[in-house]
Image: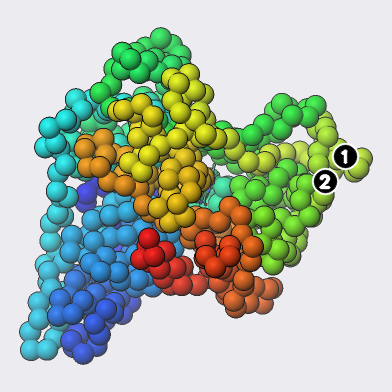
Amino acid sequence: MTSDASGGGDPQTGDLSGPDLARGVPVSSIGDGAMLAGHAHGQAVLLARRGDEFFAIGATCTHWGAPLADGLLVGDTVRCPWHHACFNLRTGEALRAPALDPLSRWSVELRDGVVHVGARLDGVAPAPLSSHPALPASVVIVGGGAAGNAAAEMLRRLAYAGRITLLSADASVPCDRPMLSKGFLSGAEPAERVPLRSPAFYKRLGIELKLGARVATIDPARRHVELIDGTRHPYDALLLATGAEPVRLEVPGAALPHVHYLRSSTDAHALVAAAQKATRAVVIGTSFIGLEVAAALRARNVAVDVVAPEAVPMAKILGEQAGSFIRALHERHGVTFHLGASAISIDDRWVTLKDETRLRADLVVVGIGVRPATALAEQAALALDRGIVVDQYLETSVKGIFAAGDIARWPDAHTGERIRVEHWVVAERQGQTAARNILGAREAFDAVPFFWTDQYDFSLAYVGHAEKWDVAQLDGQLNADTQDCTITYRRGDATLAVAVVHRDRQGLEAEVAFERAT
Ligand SMILES: Cc1cc2nc3c(=O)[nH]c(=O)nc-3n(C[C@H](O)[C@H](O)[C@H](O)COP(=O)(O)OP(=O)(O)OC[C@H]3O[C@@H](n4cnc5c(N)ncnc54)[C@H](O)[C@@H]3O)c2cc1C
Ligand code: FES
């Protein structure tokens, strides 16, 4: 189901197990700082307590539906266990992506030592930022992905009434990219779950969404962008959110029609159509996308060979132990690895490796990494450093031009280093921060980087940023029988990042610890 609420609360009824909170539960059944999942008036409701205050909000995360009772209460917020969205307990507002819609909320009454959930309350609009004196009359956003969409929505959420134009080179509305290589490719999720919003949503919010609209140039002096068809869009404030582009394989045969890349919704639909007819696939690259694609193709019973130059998949990012586990995990599902190997040519039936091994393939998927799409920034002479350089407010070297998402290299509040990451949640949160700053908030982007991957029944969540680390210390078990561990990445005395496997609360606690350390 496409989530299409613009402030209407969580779309699911959810799991109606647990106590009937409308009939009431004893105050003593919920301790200070605790949460209780139950139901009221036919809806799944989460009752949370802070001191003497009680809050009743929707029990199911509005992103992918996680049970919030498994999350963490932090101050006046609840954090989602799966991908760390953050909701305000008092208002239900989705404070931090990846959730974009608020939770429903209900009144709470205390009578004779019993807490009752009462009537459903209206949503609370966030305080508008739109009274700033230097408010731009129009905002143009280049890029209809995670950052661009989140920014456009945030501008309207903050009651910005000016013109918003969202220009996207994609052929379809902004989509849930992480789902493309997971549920959508495996067949577990229907095509209707792929778009983030419907076209009607943008219309209703007065966001002019232009699809197939590739920007060719920016003119910072005259403050307009020009599309490849010559159409011009003037702006007062500009957000660049052009994301990243897959690195292309350069071997003979790489342009054949059965060789696929996966970035856009169009790519994903083409890949699903090919997978439905394929019996043997070769995946080139052990990137997250490559490995998620391998898992999804196995769910469709396609035989999969994976080819990559490294000795242990993912070892550079996650460490040898986790990398070896991931290899064994895929092998248990029937994947064959060809490591220390590279493809030198492709024809319509075979992929040939450097050692002359030939792998039969009626489908080839290339997942060898991405590059930030900085061509426009280069043309506009913005400061670049393996991405677009932005300050803590996500503003580029040219005043009034902001950048967010995979293209932005920002001063990370946690490590003090300038970093650029390719994570969905970071891109959305940067889009949201950029929107606030376009409206004059001067809010530093200080979110702790977060990403996740799902392969078969294995899920890993990663908090922090460790480009280089000395030690990856695994606490717990990560083997065929048990997937329950925390991996801590350290350089010297510093903890740079923490990965958790099926330990959601520890992942949230690590995030809070990083926040408090900053
Ligand atoms: C298949 C897949 C699975 C993923 N899974 C995960 C995951 O599980 N967890 C995770 O953390 N991250 C994941 N990622 C990464 C995540 O999706 C990206 O980090 C995120 O989408 C980056 O957001 P963005 O807004 O910077 O760029 P994008 O979402 O890529 O959006 C960029 C937009 O800019 C547009 N554009 C580019 N150039 C122009 C131009 N000149 N004119 C107009 N428009 C232009 C593009 O058409 C696109 O609409 C995944 C990525 C893919 C592709
Ligand atoms: S399900 Fe809650 S953040 Fe994803």
Image spot of residue 59 (x, y percent): 30, 67
Asked which secondary structure carries label 2, the reply is loop
What amino acid is found at the position of numbered circle 2 in the picture? Answer: Ala
In the picture shown, does residue 322 fall above or below 428?
below
Q: Could you say whether the residue bearing mark 1 is in a helix, strand or loop?
A: loop
Q: What is the distance, in whole Å, between disc 2 and disc 1 at their CAs?
A: 7 Å
User: Is residue 3 at least partly visible in the picture?
Assistant: no
Which residue occupies 81% across, 32% down?
Answer: 346
Q: What residue sits 65% from the left and 48% below the top?
A: 287
Residue at 43% in and 42% down? 410
Query: Quadrant location of the C terminus?
Result: bottom left
Residue at disc 2, CB closer than 8 Å to ligand 1: no
* Residue 266, horizontal then vertical, whole percent: 53, 33
Looking at the image, tell me whether mark 2 or mark 1 is earlier in sequence order: 2
139 sits left or right of 327 in the view:
left
**Foreground pick, 53 / 468:** 468
Q: Is residue 102 left or right of residue 342?
A: left
The residue where tag 2 is placed is 341
| Callout 1 crowding tier (Cα within 10 Å): few <14, some 14–19, many ≥20 | few
Q: Is residue 362 visible?
A: yes
The residue depicted at 22 percent of the width and 77 percent of the height is 49
Horizontal and vertical percent position of residue 449:
45, 54
Q: Are marks 2 and 1 in contact (CB under 8 Å)?
A: yes
User: Mark 1 sits on what residue?
Assistant: 354
Residue type (three-letter) at the residue carrying disc 1: Lys
Q: Is mark 1 within 8 Å of ligand 1?
A: no
